[in-house]
Amino acid sequence: MKAAAFAYERPTDLNTALALIAKADGTTKIIAGGQSLGPMLNLRLVEPDTIIDISGLAELKRAERDGDELVIGACVTHGDVEDGRIPDVTRGAMQRVASAIAYRAVRNRGTIGGSLSHADPAADWVSSLSGLGARITLRSAAGVRNLPIENFITGALESALQPGEIVEAVRVPVMTPSAHWGYVKACRKIGEFAHAIAAVLIDPERATARVVLGALETAPIVLSDASALFGGRVTGDFKQHFDARVADAILIKAGVANAVDRHIHVAVLRRAINEAAA
Amino acid sequence: MIGLTVNTRPVKASVEPRTHLADFLRDNLNLTGTHLGCEHGVCGACTLLLDDMPARSCITYAVACDGARVTTIEGLDNDEIATELRAAFTREHALQCGYCTPGMLIAARDIVLRLPTSDEHSVRVGMSGNLCRCTGYVGIVRAVRTVIDQRRERGITPIPGGGRQALGPAGSGNATNPVVSETTARAAAKTETPDQISVAMAIPNFTPAKVFEDQFTVAFPPAKVFDMLGDVAQVAACLPGTSLIGTPTPERVEGMIRVKLGPISANFRGAARIERVPEDLTGRIVGMGSDQRSRSSTQGEIRYRLVPIEQGAATRVELSIGYSLKGMLAQIARDGLVRDLAARLTADFARNLDRHLSGVPVDGAADGSQDLNGVSLLIGLLRRRVQETIRRIWGR
Ligand SMILES: Cc1cc2nc3c(=O)[nH]c(=O)nc-3n(C[C@H](O)[C@H](O)[C@H](O)COP(=O)(O)OP(=O)(O)OC[C@H]3O[C@@H](n4cnc5c(N)ncnc54)[C@H](O)[C@@H]3O)c2cc1C
Ligand code: FES
Ligand code: FES
């Protein structure tokens, strides 16, 4: 249970890090909190020649408002969000998500950027940030690009991250005062990866509903206009209009063949909708 | 060379990058109070304080903590909360063998510090990252609750966030000097010696731990598809990442398949037995293989059935895929991730089969040069399928 030997590099500024990553080959890995990579290294499922530690980069450890978005550096931890060390633009939604990720000792090191880069379909930020309509900022020595989270996660442990790129930040839109949020995950044991996740962001005043069905076998299903789940129109009594058959049909079409799995996903969605309505 | 403050004492040491903090403390500093259980972050035995925050020392490398403050259970002898907790653990019979106890005390100290009240649910949630395999949790939970109650009664208020101000991983960012490795210090290239699989090895029947179904259609008649599935070399050519070893017979094949699961790439080498029933157009492939790198082994079974569709002009291939996975990979490869992988393999296979039957060359499959890559076409296909579905449901 010991990692195979690797060389270690710890740049102290982002540009140096990007230069190192730019010339890195397939046997180089970035490490942030190490809470996903560490287990894989110890189990020797991954044996990189070189590891570049980005956890010391001040540029990635800040959070600030930029217009209608909160820009959260990639190396901000789940614990930072849980403890309110960064500004809250989601009326507590991110804080509640963060506090239910893994365990305290893992949250104190695991980062938001690491979680998204790892792209585990069952990870909490993957679904919740898609639900919040967040974007991800990717930077390489050549430049920077922004993508909606749902375009970043392309499959199980697969993302749109290109060689030479790092996740620099996550941009979370300020939640409107009239928006309702619900986030529920099904776990058999606290802190384990979820078997089903639902995130809903419903704004009856604007008649909009955004729904994410996550912890599938692959990338989450993101419905940016989920009005069909509520009879075609999003109103204040959306909870009463929720149509589980539509949700079931969506899951079937997405390839969730097992009826029990679908039942769990629909039940979790219903709970998230109830939470949003409460 | 790294510098740490361990239990208030400055320590300087040169340490291999792969050494995790727990090993460093135990082996170099003889601080054996930090225990190791799972060594992959799950059990909590190795929990200690890093810059005063609880952290897993088994998945935190010592080099990454350069400049940090480390407090192990040995450093909490005179700590007020830890002293109260030790007394409560003794009183409530919160330990037997004591293996989990150092980690338990560190986790407990953190929630005593932070939780406003001692309600049982919050305490259980707060302690859920620490496993005890012999005492049970009743006494532990009771001990923690009493300490919280007593302190709140004494007017000691909780400290939200444990008092931390800095952002980022606990223990990070204390060192200001960059570390740049010399090329000579780079890890020596790892050589892989191939597994020795005996040709005579019998492939036993087995009961798969997991079974799932899949299907695809090909625009050719069942008889033609069945013939093609009988040609082992052709089948292998349609499976990306596969290469055959030796010459296959219609009943038996040996080979390798390289699969990629996120950052993990595994090279399974093994053998399979093939059974076919031409009368009902069904077949079965039972195989076993192992990946040396991840010290993992798998047994798998694929049953197929060909069903004529479109008046026999096309075929629906119904698959039942069963597998059991053992070893390190099984720790990471959850059911869902394996299914996603199998779905990708199946879709690539279906596409290649279709091409093959149409006489279009199958691109670089059999030489093993092309890994089964997750960002392959299929994900594109799947996503498109989902989007189309959603559009259909939404009537747009
Ligand atoms: C016991 C346990 C339980 C857990 N339970 C949950 C859970 O319930 N829900 C959940 O969501 N997560 C869970 N996790 C995972 C945890 O949230 C991790 O912290 C997170 O997935 C990875 O973050 P990290 O900073 O530790 O990344 P690392 O482990 O350092 O890196 C992960 C991957 O991302 C890459 N990477 C990291 N940062 C960047 C970057 N900025 N740019 C580009 N690539 C990068 C690395 O190269 C690596 O491939 C659990 C972990 C453990 C150990
Ligand atoms: S040994 Fe670190 S969590 Fe199990
Ligand atoms: S006291 Fe023995 S494992 Fe907890």
Image (cartoon, rainbow, N blue to C red):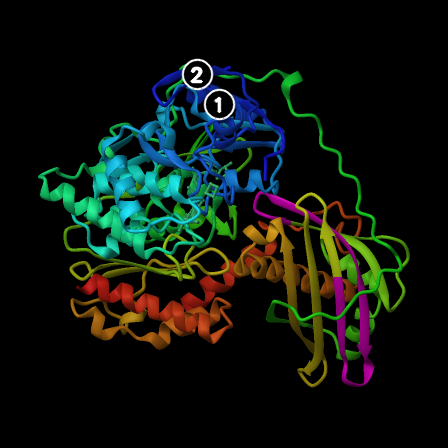
Name the main secondary structure of what is drawn in magenta.
strand
Q: Which residue is drawn at the image coordinates 82% and 81% (left, top)?
A: B278
Drawn side of residue A41 relative to residue A190, left or right: right
Q: Can residue A68 be seen here?
A: no
Residue A15 location, x and y as percent? Answer: 45, 20
Residue B382 location, x and y as percent? Answer: 53, 61
Report crowding for label 1: few under 14, some 14 to 19, many 20 or more residues within 10 A (C-alpha).
few
Res B182 → quadrant: top right
Q: Is B277 inside the magenta-drawn segment?
A: yes
Q: Earlier in the sequence, mark 2 or mark 1?
A: 2
Query: Which element type, helix, strand or loop, lies under badge 2?
Result: strand
Quarter of the figure that contains the C terminus of chain B:
bottom left
Magenta stretch, residue numbers: B260-287
Location of mark 1 (residue): B29
Res B309 → quadrant: bottom right
What amino acid is found at the position of numbered circle 1 in the picture?
A: Leu
Drawn side of residue A278 relative to residue B387, left or right: left
Location of mark 2 (residue): B11
Tell me if residue B356 comes above or below residue B216 in the rendering: above
Quadrant of ligand 1: it is: top left
Report crowding for label 2: few under 14, some 14 to 19, many 20 or more residues within 10 A (C-alpha).
few
- Can marks 2 and 1 be said to lie on one chain? yes
User: Label 1: chain?
Assistant: B
Q: Which residue is drawn at the image coordinates 33% and 38% (left, top)?
A: B106
Drawn side of residue B302 relative to residue B100, left or right: right
Residue A76 location, x and y as percent? Answer: 34, 34
What amino acid is found at the position of numbered circle 2 in the picture?
A: Val
Is A184 or B48 nearer to us in this picture? B48
Q: Which residue is drawn at the image coordinates 56% and 51% (left, top)?
A: B331
User: Label 2: chain?
Assistant: B
